């Protein structure tokens, strides 16, 4: 078997570590999921399902429904399938696909998503893709990073990336995220055809308990695409250690300044 290319590695995730360390994402997702008003027989898309922790809860709230878990990472999808039990697995399916080019048209009663949309750079195309995947009267209920998300960390990443030891690989590296503000998100949803659009930002800081946890978290959740282009483990570790040392001087230390963008919208009856 040939080794994966850098671009292929950057699309993949360490699913086991993601599952182990994903308490903040899981908690954010649970709050979003708790706002859903489900009949129990819907056909839903979990867009960016990750390791399937929330997919499983969705299925438990849909005794007569069905959920398609979608993710770009096949590692995540394998983990998500294993996370289901005998009662829920018959009502679940899993698809590896890009959110911008969803392989669905007029399929879903609703689309649920957390902590995924900010990995898509073209949000106009994303909104059009989501719109096409929904049935008329279908809903979108989602949350992702937005606005000034991780602003302090991103500034430090840019500064350290310019150092001689990293600049060859990261000096011109383009950020792999897009953090929309609420106004632009609403405009993109309206332009795609959605109605009853609601968008808004909320702060959701996360504090790691130690330098080690901070570095593991960055490696797994935030900077895996940066690290994929650094050629050696020694350099990757040095990059994370320098970020951790800078954050240790903050008050409190090892805090990540997260901002979440909430998205609600409906596809009209004649969409």
Image (cartoon, grey):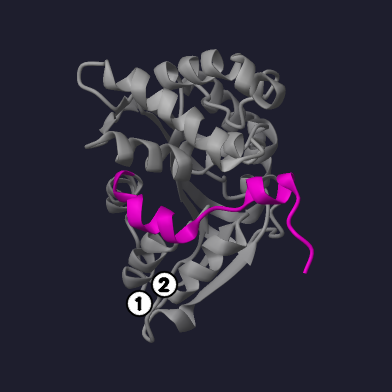
Instruction: Say which residue appears at 42% left-offset and 53% top-offset.
Output: 18
Q: Which residue is mark 2?
A: 41
Given residues 183 and 92, the one toward you in this image is 92
Task: For label 1, count other residues whose C-alpha is less than 10 Å away and answer few (under 14), some (14-19) or many (20+).
Answer: some
Q: Are marks 1 and 2 in contact (CB under 8 Å)?
A: yes
Judge from the rendering whether residue 144 lies leftward or rightward of residue 38; answer left or right: right
* Residue 201 drawn in magenta: no
Residue 55 in the image: above or below residue 264: below
| Part of the protein shown in magenta | 1-24
Instruction: Say which residue appears at 33% left-offset and 65% top-offset.
Output: 57
Q: Which residue is mark 1?
A: 63
Residue 99 in the image: above or below residue 261: below
Percent x, y of residue 86: 38, 86
Given residues 202 and 14, the one toward you in this image is 14
Task: For label 2, count other residues whose C-alpha is less than 10 Å away and answer few (under 14), some (14-19) or many (20+).
Answer: some
Judge from the rendering whether residue 153 lies leftward or rightward of residue 105; answer left or right: left
């Amino acid at each position: 078997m040939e080794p994966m290319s850098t671009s292929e590695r950057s699309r993949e995730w360490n699913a086991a570590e993601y599952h182990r360390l994903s308490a903040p994402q899981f908690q954010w997702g649970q709050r979003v999921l708790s706002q859903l008003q489900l009949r129990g027989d819907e056909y839903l898309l979990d867009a960016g399902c990750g390791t399937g922790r929330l997919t499983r809860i969705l299925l438990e709230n849909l005794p007569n429904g069905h959920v398609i878990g979608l993710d770009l990472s096949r590692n995540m999808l394998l983990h998500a399938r294993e996370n289901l039990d005998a009662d829920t697995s018959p009502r679940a399916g899993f698809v590896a696909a890009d959110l911008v080019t969803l392989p669905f048209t007029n399929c879903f009663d609703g689309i649920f998503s957390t902590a995924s949309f900010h990995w898509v750079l073209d949000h106009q195309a994303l909104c059009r893709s989501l719109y096409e995947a929904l049935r008329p009267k279908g809903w979108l209920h989602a949350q992702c990073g937005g606005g000034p998300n991780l602003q302090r960390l991103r500034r430090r990443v840019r500064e350290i990336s310019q150092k001689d030891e990293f600049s060859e690989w990261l000096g011109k590296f383009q950020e792999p995220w897009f953090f929309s503000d609420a106004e632009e998100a609403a405009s993109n949803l309206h332009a795609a055809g959605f109605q009853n659009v609601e968008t808004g930002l909320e702060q959701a800081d996360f504090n790691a308990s130690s330098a080690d946890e901070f570095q593991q978290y960055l490696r797994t959740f935030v900077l895996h695409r940066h690290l994929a282009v650094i050629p050696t483990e020694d350099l990757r570790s040095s990059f994370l250690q320098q970020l951790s040392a800078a954050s240790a001087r903050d008050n409190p230390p090892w805090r990540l300044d997260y901002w979440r963008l909430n998205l609600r919208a409906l596809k009209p009856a004649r969409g």
